[in-house]
């Protein structure tokens, strides 16, 4: 047996009888210990930028559930914040940014000031020294399209139409924003890696609203460029691409993005994903967060069908999207037991 962490082995293409597991947004409001600490922070961004607090909430879900990975506690919108855009989080209604309405708004953005993110690297340093030896540490950022969609609209919308409209009206300006985000995100992930994360995940949460041509231009190609740059600069660090809503494009993405793992969202049929990707490609996912809220027989059935679909291939058990605040803790405990006990 090697002493490689289970999550890293899966990302290197090795299958195991019990898949490693973690949950997207595993540090969050469903945990009472998270809510207690969150109540002490002035704002959500202050919370992210206070290393003692951010490190503590990164570790909370690992302590409670013994997941195989910790994910850095931060947010994808720290990049616009470090470009000088005003970013805040309204309790209950999500992020608010000063929207970008014109090409001039893009040229007015500041240079990416990575020093503003030094608390994030300090958080990584603190977590690293406290993580159990077999737990992998995941860093992350948003994909250029998803981050740009918040920068243009100033908030989440049902379909991020403001950014799509902006890209049709001002393709050059939009393209320059995407380019800047590619560069900033690569620099940011490289610094996270140098501070101590061992795997990075790129979240393209809004890829699914893009029709084919736009998907290629704004989601797939920028992510491929990011991964190529990361592989040049830090070749040994596995990259997970979570292209939410990629749908039928998934098989092609597994051949063109050159990531080490691919996150599947809730909508994908695990059996179809397994049948339409090479057997050595590591797939991550994809329990419906609503099944985790429901619990009981429905939860058991969903877990078993995912385990069955990915048996014999490299797989990381996860949700198909972030865990929801109303998720009962006992259901998460049940999930961990069932996945780990699956083949005892
Ligand atoms: O996974 C983890 O536990 C690490 C932390 C993490 C957060 N956000 C903390 C957070 C990660 C990986 C993210 C990623 C993120 N942030 C994404 C991509 C993943 C996804 O869910 O699609 C996106 C689109 C964002 C932007 C964002 N941040 C939104 C839309 C919201 C509001 C919605 C919500 O869940 O409240 C946030 C706020 C946010 N980011 C919270 C947390 C724990 C909740 C804020 C709070 O506790 O007050």
Image: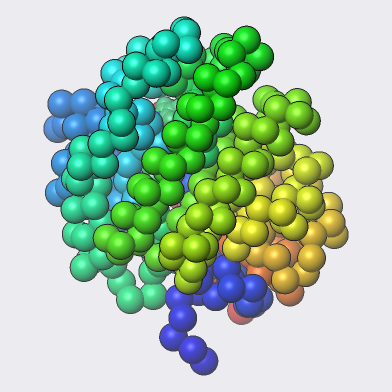
Q: Is residue 302 left or right of residue 222?
A: right
Image position of 163 with respect to 77: above or below: above
Looking at the image, what colour scheme do you see?
rainbow
Vertical arrangement, residue 313 with respect to residue 75, above or below: below
Residue under the point 57% across and 48% down: 225
The residue lying at 52 percent from left, 39 percent from top is: 143
Q: Is residue 126 visible?
A: yes
Give 165 or 287, whichever is nearer the viewer. Answer: 165
The image quadrant in which ligand 1 is located: top left
| The quarter of the displayed image where residue 325 is located | top left
Q: Nearer the viewer, residue 54 or 239?
A: 239
Nearer to the camera, 122 or 264: 122
Residue 256 image position (x, y, % from top left): 72, 54
Q: Position of residue 105 (x, y in %)?
A: 40, 12
Query: Where residue 160 sits in the image (x, y, percent)?
Result: 58, 18
- Pick whichever, 191 or 29, lies toward us: 191
Which residue reaches farthest bottom?
A: 1
| Left or right: residue 72 compared with residue 280 | left
Q: Is residue 323 visible?
A: no
Q: Is residue 105 left or right of residue 266?
A: left
Q: Residue, x 46% and y 81% (percent of image)?
A: 4
On screen, residue 114 versus residue 142, left or right, reads left
Number of marks in picture:
0
Residue drawn at 20 percent across, 46 percent down: 118
Q: Is the C terminus in the top left, top right, bottom left or bottom right quadrant?
A: bottom right
Where is residue 66, by image quadrant? bottom left
């Amino acid at each position: 047996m090697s002493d490689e962490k289970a999550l890293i082995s899966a990302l290197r293409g090795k299958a195991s009888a019990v898949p490693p597991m973690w949950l997207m947004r595993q540090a969050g409001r469903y945990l009472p210990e998270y809510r207690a600490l969150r109540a002490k922070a002035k704002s959500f961004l202050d919370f992210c930028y206070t290393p003692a607090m951010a490190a503590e909430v990164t570790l909370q879900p690992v302590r409670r559930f013994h997941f195989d990975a910790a994910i850095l506690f931060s947010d994808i919108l720290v990049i616009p914040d470090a470009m000088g855009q005003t970013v805040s989080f309204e309790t209950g209604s999500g992020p608010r940014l000063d929207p970008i309405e014109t090409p001039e708004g893009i040229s007015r953005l500041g240079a990416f000031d990575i020093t503003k993110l030094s608390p994030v690297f300090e958080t990584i340093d603190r977590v690293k020294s406290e993580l159990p030896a077999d737990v992998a540490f995941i860093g992350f950022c948003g994909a250029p399209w998803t981050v740009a969609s918040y920068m243009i609209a100033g908030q989440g919308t049902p379909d991020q139409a403001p950014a799509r409209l902006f890209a049709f009206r001002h393709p050059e300006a939009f393209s320059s924003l995407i380019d800047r985000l590619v560069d900033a995100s690569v620099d940011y992930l490289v610094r996270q890696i140098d501070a101590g994360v061992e795997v990075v995940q790129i979240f393209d949460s809004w890829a699914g609203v893009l029709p084919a041509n736009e998907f290629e231009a704004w989601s797939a190609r920028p992510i491929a460029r990011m991964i190529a740059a990361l592989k040049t600069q830090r070749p040994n660090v596995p990259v997970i691409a979570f292209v939410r809503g990629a749908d039928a494009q998934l098989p092609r993405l597994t051949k063109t993005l050159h990531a080490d793992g691919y996150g599947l969202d809730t909508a994908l049929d695990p059996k179809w994903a397994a049948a339409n990707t090479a057997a050595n490609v590591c797939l991550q996912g994809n329990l419906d967060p609503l099944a985790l809220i429901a619990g009981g027989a429905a939860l058991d059935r969903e877990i078993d069908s995912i385990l069955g679909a990915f048996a014999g291939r490299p797989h990381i058990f996860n949700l198909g999207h972030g865990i929801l605040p109303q998720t009962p803790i006992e259901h998460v405990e049940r999930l961990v037991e069932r996945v780990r006990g699956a083949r005892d």
